[in-house]
Amino acid sequence: MRDSHDPGLSSTAEVSRNLAPLSALRRPAAADGPNAGGMKVIEAGVWRTADLYAAGMTKRDIVAACSANGLIRIRRGLYRKRSADSEVVRAAEHGGALACASALRHHGVWVLDDEQKTHVWLGEHGSRHAHTACDCVSHWDDSGAAFGVVSLVDALVQAADCLGQEAFLAAYESAWQQGKLTAADRRRVRQRLSARHRWLVDFARPDAESGLESIVRLRLARRGIRVECQVRIDGVGRVDFVLDGWLIVEIDGKENHDGPSERHKDLRRDALAAARGFGRLRFDYALVRYEWPIVEAAILAELSPARAQGRRG
Ligand SMILES: [Zn+2]
Ligand SMILES: [Zn+2]
């Protein structure tokens, strides 16, 4: 309740009233402008003073909202909602919108664990601001500038150049598999990608079950290996990959394959697969992720005699 005897104290209700116009702010003005160059930035509780004025707040409203802690000043001319996402705020401290890998993570899309830096879109002529413990990756692509989070489509396009083709494919397939990309979005990503990355959109599938699966499929396809994923084999069950129609490759995930009963199950599946003419190789996440040359050499060595004899599944 507002204490009517103390004009300096704002009640929760008053803060809500002061912040109410902000709910109408879907995106900061700059991202909507004619120079936005196709980038879409989603509003996420960080605003310039001009945005607050445009939403109908007065200088007095801003002061009241700040003193009640509903609005917090990031720096001169820039404010955040108290509940704004900490990564979005960090990007704003750096001078722009959460982008690329950081935006993908924000959108719930799979990104490699070791990609922990904050990626920030500053616009073509934006300014980078100093802030504590800055290890941000700045993106200067496209014109305009805004605060918030770049759209999923834009983050994917940025990731292809910044993180590389494998990370792009893993993120794109993760987004598609989760139903986060419409057909129009997929066309837009393809359109906006550099020509050298476009084939990845055609290569991608909507049913990849993990980022690791996407990466392995891409690496093997690049070696000319025919790859089928998540294949159900009678008597054996579902396997991660079948290469050239006969070599089963399984990537053990986080589940425990060391226990005696799991080991028995694995051995039983191996025997059943062998009885049906399948070969089998098994790797774990660490091998695939950090020692790929060993994995690839093992696969190629296993496949090559059959390839030399013209064996195909
Ligand atoms: Zn990046
Ligand atoms: Zn920074």
Image (cartoon, grey):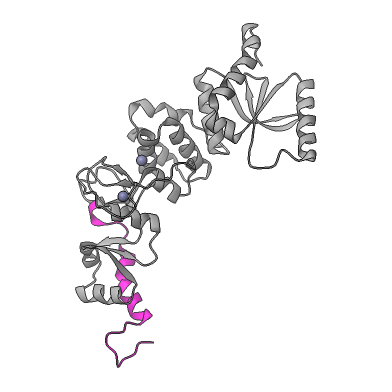
Asked if residue 219 is among those painted magenta in the image, a careful observer would answer: no
* Residue 134 seen from this side: yes
Q: Is 14 rendered above or below residue 301?
A: below
Q: In which quarter of the image is the N terminus?
A: bottom left
Image coordinates of residue 103 in percent, x first then y, are 39, 48
Q: Residue at x 48, y 49 (%)?
A: 108
Whether residue 228 is situated above or below residue 26 in the rendered picture: above
Image quarter of residue 81: bottom left
In the rendered image, residue 251, in percent from the top left (x then y), is placed at 63, 33
Q: Where is residue 253 in the image (x, y as percent from the top left)?
A: 63, 39
Of residues 81 and 86, the one nearer the viewer is 86
Taking the view exactly as shown, the residue that stands out farthest to the front is 133
Q: Where is residue 221 in the image (x, y as percent from the top left)?
A: 52, 22
x 54%, y 26%: residue: 292
**Foreground: 149 or 232?**
149
Check residue 26 for magenta coloring.
yes
The image shows a total of numbered marks equal to: 0
Residue stretch rendered in magenta on the structure: 1-30
Q: Can residue 147 be seen in this view?
A: no
